[in-house]
Amino acid sequence: MTTAPRRAAVLGHPVAHSLSPRLHRAAYAALGLEGWRYDAVDVTEDALPGFVAALDDSWAGLSVTMPLKQAVMPLLDHVEPLAGVVGAVNTVLVQPGGRRPVLTGANTDVHGIVAALTEGLAVRGQAAVPPTGGRTAVVLGAGATAASTLAALAELGCTTPVVLVRSIGRTGGLARAAHRMGVEPVLRPLTEAVGALARADLVVSTLPPHAADGLAAELAGAGAGAGAGAAPGVLLDVAYDPRRTALADAWETRGGVAVPGERMLLHQAVEQVRLMTGRPGPLDAMAAALGEALEAPAG
C-alpha cells in the first residue's frame, strides 16, 4: 500500500470524546508516515450517506463508532465476511477504484476482544487455543459490542455462552447475529449474574460505564470464592471510564484476572492501522499514547 500522505478519521455522534485520534496519530508518527492525518468528525446517521459519497482517493480509511456501525453497511461496496456475520462495521477501507474509490467494511472489534482476553489468559498461564472440552463464558449486555463478543468467544472455544441481559425481549438483533455465526447463546436475566460469573472461564462486560457498578457491589458482598467455590477466570470490562472500573476491582478481589477495556480499544486500533496503512500497527507506541490520554486530567 502506498505511503503517500493519506487521510483517515473516526466518525460518530457524539465523537469529541474519542481516543482514536491519539492512537492513530501516535501510530503514524512511529511509522514515519509524514503528512498522514487522522481526525474526529461528528457525523449523524442522516449525514452519513453524503459523507461517504464524498470520499475520494486522498482517504485511507474510516473508524466507525456508534451509532453508525450498522448504518454504514449498505453504503459500502463490500463487507468482509466477519463484519457481515457480526452485523457491524467499525472500519472502512478506502481503496483506489477508477472513477471512485472502492469502500470495504471490516470489523476489528472482534480482533480487539480476542487479543485482550488472550492477554488475560496468559496471566493465568493458559493459551488462547481452547482446552479439551472447550471453555465456559458469560457476556453481560446484548448490544452491538455483544455481537462482536460472541464471535470473539467462538474463536476462543466457546459457542454456547451465557448472555445476561436486562430484557430478554430486546435481544432479537443479537440472536440473529448469533445464528449467522453458528453460536448458541443461553439467555438469562441479569439478576442471575453472580452465580453465572462464578462458573465462567471467560467473562466480557459490554455494559456502559457504571452500568455494572451494582453487580460489582453484589460480587464484593458475596465474598472471595463465593458461588461455585473456585477462583473466577478472566474478565474483560470493555468500559474504561473510570480507568479502573468497580467491576474489575471486585473481580480481582475474588481472585480473578481483570483485563481493562482500554486493551480492547488498543488492539482493535492496532489492527485498523495495519489495514489502513499496510504496515503492522506499532503496539508499544500506541499503548503509550493511550496511557497518556487516560491519565490526563479531564477538562
Image (cartoon, grey):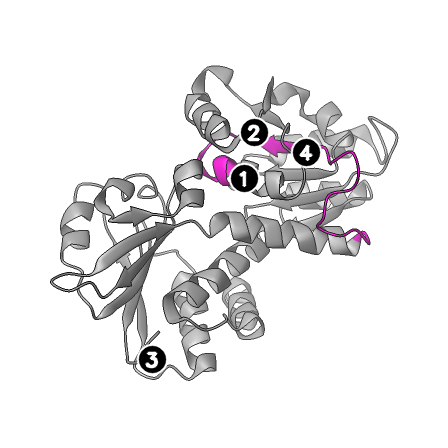
* Kind of residue indicated by mark 2: Val
Residue at the (39%, 37%) spot, across then down: 87
Tell which circle, 1 or 4, labels the residue nearer the N-terminal end.
4
What is the CA distance from the residue labelled 1 to the residue labelled 3? 32 Å
Answer few, some or many: residues within 10 Å of disc 2's Cα (few below 14, many 20 plus, some between 14 and 19). some
Q: Residue furthest front?
A: 98
- Note whether 30 is above or below 175 in the view shown: below
Q: Position of residue 165 (x, y in %)?
A: 55, 24
Report the predominant secondary structure element of the magenta stretch. loop
Looking at the rendered structure, the kind of residue marked 1 is Ala
Which numbered disc, 2 or 4, marks the residue that appears first in the sequence? Answer: 4
Please state which amino acid type lies under the numbered disc 3: Thr
Q: Quadrant of residue 35?
A: bottom left
Q: Which residue lies under the disc numbered 2? A: 183
Q: Is residue 161 magenta?
A: no
Instruction: State how far apart marks 2 and 4 are (Cα).
Output: 12 Å
Give the left or right position of residue 101, taking residue 140 as reference: left
